[in-house]
Image (cartoon, rainbow, N blue to C red):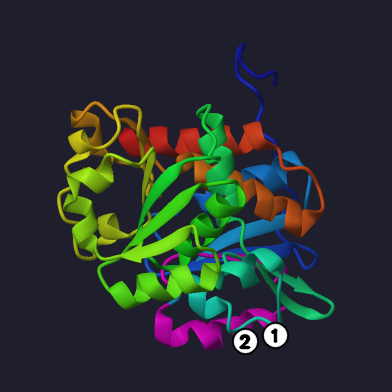
Amino acid sequence: MRAPPNRRPRARRPPIGGGTRVYAILGDPIAHSLSPAMQNAAFAASGLDAVYVPLHVGADGLAAAVAGLRACAVAGWNVTVPHKEAMATLVDELRPRARGCGAVNTVLHTARGLVGDNTDGAGFVAALRGTGRSPRGMEILLVGAGGSARGVAAALLAAGGRRLVIANRTRARADGLAAALGSKRAVAAGLEVLADRAELARFALVVNCTSATLGTAALPRIPFAATRVDALCCDLMYGEPSPFLRHAARAHRATMDGLGMLLHQGALAFTLWTHRQAPLEVMRRALAAVLRDLDT
């Protein structure tokens, strides 16, 4: 039967069988993740006998989950909140991007063992460049010091960020990340910097890397009107606009959610696993379709 006009026929994946390669995403929570829709669409469009599944894994079960994935020869997996730093201690080898930031969001199960990489930062920078902006020469405020923040911070410095201020509720965590980055351009601060209007006026980019919208403690209210008028305010969360982005928009600042980062980091992970170019537009359409379904 011919597809209706202006609609592309959906690529069909082979039936799941003994030869199907299994990939996964581990997190807590995990029900919100759009990665399964994106990656399964990519596998189908590429004609690969592979499937990608979400796994709800708590912190106390992470080591056992990794051992099980290893024993079952699961081909690779992604890691989301709150496991990215812990995963770096559970793999056999760290690639430079993961070693440099101390966090893993992508694991490859290879003949020599589990290899950890980090595509978060490169994904964020790709999304940023998609808006016509580059980190080069920017003064940047990064809120949070967890696993996602680590990948993004390292990539922003590598892309030429001039000064990176890492603000975190627990100052010691911010100090630790700044030290791990090994750059004089990275400095730590407490959350009091979010109310410092003189300091806010310096930042061309403000990035929320916390998981506040997933139910943890809310961020202090930021006076976005004190930031540069051309500042871009980003939140790594995606879907419903976060309070962070809503407040920024009310101050007439440009905003970007985490959907572009999700797309690009996922495309990079797909290529690492399959050694193929990711079908980026297929993945983009899959994300858009899920979000439309959630809105209806």
Q: Which residues are magenta?
A: 58-83
User: In terms of image quadrants, where is residue 224?
Assistant: top left
**Residue visible at 78% across and 43% down?**
277
Q: Is residue 32 left or right of residue 11?
A: left
Number of numbered discs visible in the structure rendering: 2
Disc on res. 71: 1
**Residue reaching furthest top?**
5
Above or below: residue 74 compared with residue 68: above
Secondary structure type for disc 2: helix
Task: Say which amino acid is labelled 1.
Answer: Ala
**Residue visible at 59% across and 44% down?**
264
Disc on res. 135: none
Task: Examine the rendering and report whether any part of residue 103 can be seen.
Answer: no
Are the residues at dot 1 and dot 2 in contact (C-beta closer than 8 Å)?
Answer: yes
Queried whether the magenta region covers residue 150, the answer comes back as no
Which residue occupies the foreground of this view, 147 or 29? 147
Q: In x, y percent, where is residue 167?
A: 31, 61
Disc on res. 67: 2
Which residue occupies the foreground of this view, 177 or 24? 177
**Residue reaching furthest right?**
111
Above or below: residue 139 compared with residue 175: above
